[in-house]
Image: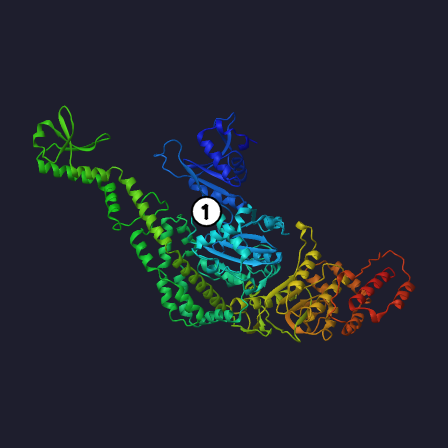
Amino acid sequence: MGISIKEVDVSVVSPMMQHYIKTKEEYKDCILFYRLGDFYEMFFEDAETVSQELELTLTGKDCGLAERAPMCGVPFHAADNYINRLVEKGYKVAICEQVEDPKKAKGIVKREVIRVVTPGTNLYTQALDETKNNYIMSVAYISNRFGIAFADVTTGAFMVTEVEKLRNLLDEIYKFSPAEIICNEAFCMSGVDLEELRNRLHISVSALDNWYFDDDLCDRTLKEHFHVGTLEGLGLKDYDCAVIAAGALLTYLLETQKTSLEHMREITPYITDKYMLIDSSTRRNLELTETMREKEKRGSLLWVLDKTKTAMGARMLRSFIEQPLIEQEAINRRLDAVEEINRQEMDREEIREYLGPVYDLERLISRVSYQSANPRDLIAFKTSIGMIPHIRRLLAQFQSEELQKVYEDMDELQDLYQVLDKAIVEDPPLAMKEGGIIKDGYDHQIDDFRQAKTKGKTWLAELEAEEREKTGIKNLRIKFNKVFGYYLEVTNSFKDMVPDYYTRKQTLTNAERYITPRLKELEDMILGAEDKLYALEYDRFAEIRNMIAGEVERIQKTARAIAKLDAYLSLALVASRNQYVRPKINTKGIIDIKDGRHPVVEKMITNDMFIPNDTYLDNGKNRISVITGPNMAGKSTYMRQTALIVLMAQIGSFVPASKANIGIVDRIFTRVGASDDLASGQSTFMVEMTEVANILRNATAKSLLILDEIGRGTSTFDGLSIAWAVIEHISNPKLLGAKTLFATHYHELTELEGKLPGVNNYCIAVKERGDDIVFLRKIVKGGADKSYGIQVAKLAGVPDSVINRAKELVEELVSADITATVKDIASEGKKTKLKQPVHYDEVDMEQISLFDTVKDDDVLEELKSIKIDELRPVDALNVLYRLQNKLKNRW
């Protein structure tokens, strides 16, 4: 470990190091990239950190101290890559740049921090997923409410909302997946698990000083930035907490980005209740944007639906999937657009062709506003807006409301196109200050300098010949030296022939030196022509860039219109290619799907052998479907496909079915599979019960529940009891009454059909061939009579010796079948007052060792003492379980 910056006596170090230490003091939480010539250097602890994180050589620098200061550096032209790698690891990087020309500097070159790069403000294009927003989130926890603000500095998006519960806040975090969260100190004590956010979700989380969240500062900052007199003008009247979160975020961005953020022109309040609620577990289980295990796009719903041609369209489609609609009219407007596009297939394909060359206008205009856009960015911009007139020409004939709005919002931007077409060469260099950017004919000064640079010698030779002819001085020469520049030299023998417009500059022994106005003009053009040319080209380029930045509002509106059109085109194309149908949308709670298919699974299997299935759920007699059948038969696929079809319909997509009538649901909850959460010390069963508790507490009668194997993480009778109680709770309209698909291996639950309102049995059809089985993948009415577990084990390749032993054991255990008893309990269930929910803590499960000695008389005595009329179904099951355990040691 080298010398620490805290140990340095500032008075003894060099002036440059004094400035470094002062700057570092202002940016304590950042790694300081300090520009020295062609390198960015880091010193002291920063150098050691960067050396270790990026595996760079650690050296030292003499700066007046007893020992050399630790130093590490990277070339300035490759700095973006190194900065990005540090930001990806969660660091903040302050870039301290030379802000004056070293050639003109007196003393040390002036340096300032020009920008702070954080995970949520990274502009490095190569590091960002172009199909995904890079959000920074601000949270203000005040008076038991969470004010939330999201921004994406790469696109200019800025949104706010408020929620009351921590779980709702987490849902928003999972929905938007921010790279960085800033918050007030109260948020850190609100019960949120900061380590989970940092370590499991890889979000950079930092608490800011309280002054960032000052009411007056936040209010003033928002008004000044958006140029409004009151916050009502921004639609923020009823968002007190969100205003503070937004104001703090804007202050933080202005402070770190060192720019006016002119591209952030509007702030959008949104109400979480306007969209379908999808919690983090459901997003993961349904694999909406990435797969559960590999975290890859391939295999997700987004992978199936995303056939967009632009990065903007890809982000828009992702937002559709992450925020399904719950308003019937809005859903139908999207469906109208998709349907009309597919009626005009030729136009659809032609528009998609025009969208191909369109670059990411949202991120391009952000770079323009940051003044970091290079000449090639402007050519990409020109190419992109050059496609808009062709797209609008085709769009003009569409009649649906959404497509008409897209047409109206799309500005052709031809004034900008014409300027760029006249000004910027077609294949400009990346560098902005090395010339070769501006076209000939755009600026006569640039043309003159460019000619001076290339034709200077020719001009001088022509002038020399011209002057010889005019004066008759045959040995007249144009020469150059550093003192006088260019001059005309005439020997003494011809000096009498020198004309009046020659001005003498120097007298030599045998010659005279002169200048003329024309020679002086050429000298001014030739000397430093290259430097002047480069400077003037950069000035003109910057003027054009600033002109474009001044039109940011028009450009952003057009970019959003293109993004929306691209998303609709993608949904239309996928519907056409995969034989999807337009769903009818109802508000009566009926979900009626004919020949439904899983949109992802059918694309993953190569033999086109996906077996379609029907689904019917409503708010009455068909509220709960209890689905039985063996593992691997397709229960989970069937349930997930139902959830995905409903979700697809509510984002405005056609669906994989022959016919679909979808009742709008306010929330989708899933409990599908689980794995031990060892990192937080939670078992499979604990994770399962936590998710079940969340569902039962937060679902409504308008929700859709997908429950798979509830209770399997514990002993058979505990699990059966919990599953039974959960169905009782859901089936009771006074307690919940949600539409539910409930898959189970507990065949005893099939006895609930006809005993509980709205419960119906379904099973996966299986064909038996001796000891083997064939999965037919078809959902049929009725319950399965057995699980075929041994046959599935055989299919999986379990050794024959184990299979044969399992068959012997199952025959012994069949004699203890409790189905008949459960039928009795279910019958008693008619008398159960369902409005009294089951309290799981009342269940007393006694575990008896198999080696205890038990007499048959003990069991008989206990049986005699039981008051059956007073038992609830769950208690009866537990008693039966306890008695059976007592008898096991007798077998």
Quadrant of the rendered image containing residue 846: bottom right
Q: Nearer the viewer, residue 423 or 673?
A: 423
Crowd class of label 1 (few under 14; some 14 to 19; many from 20; radius 10 Å): many
Name the one closer to the observer, 321 or 172.
Answer: 172
Q: Secondary structure at mark 1?
A: helix
Residue at image position (36%, 59%) is 385
How does the figure colour the protein chain or chains?
A: rainbow
Q: Picture coordinates of residue 709 (x, y %)?
A: 69, 63
Vertical placement of residue 464 versus 649, above or below: above
Residue 252 vertical position relative to residue 852 in the rendered view, above or below: above
The residue depicted at 46 percent of the width and 52 percent of the height is 154
Q: From this viewpoint, is residue 624 visible?
A: yes
What residue would you read off at disc 1?
A: 257
Query: Residue 779: image x %, image y %?
Result: 64, 71
Identify the residue at image location x=74%, y=70%: 834
Q: Position of residue 717 (x, y in %)?
A: 77, 63
Q: Observer-nearest residue: 129 or 618?
A: 618
Whether residue 292 appears in this view of the structure is no
Front in this rendered view, residue 589 or 258: 258
Instruction: Identify which amino acid the numbered label 1 is placed on.
Output: Gln
Quarter that holds the C terminus:
bottom right
- In the picture, measured across the screen, residue 752 lies left or right of residue 361, that is right
Q: Classify the position of the N terminus by image quarter.
A: top right
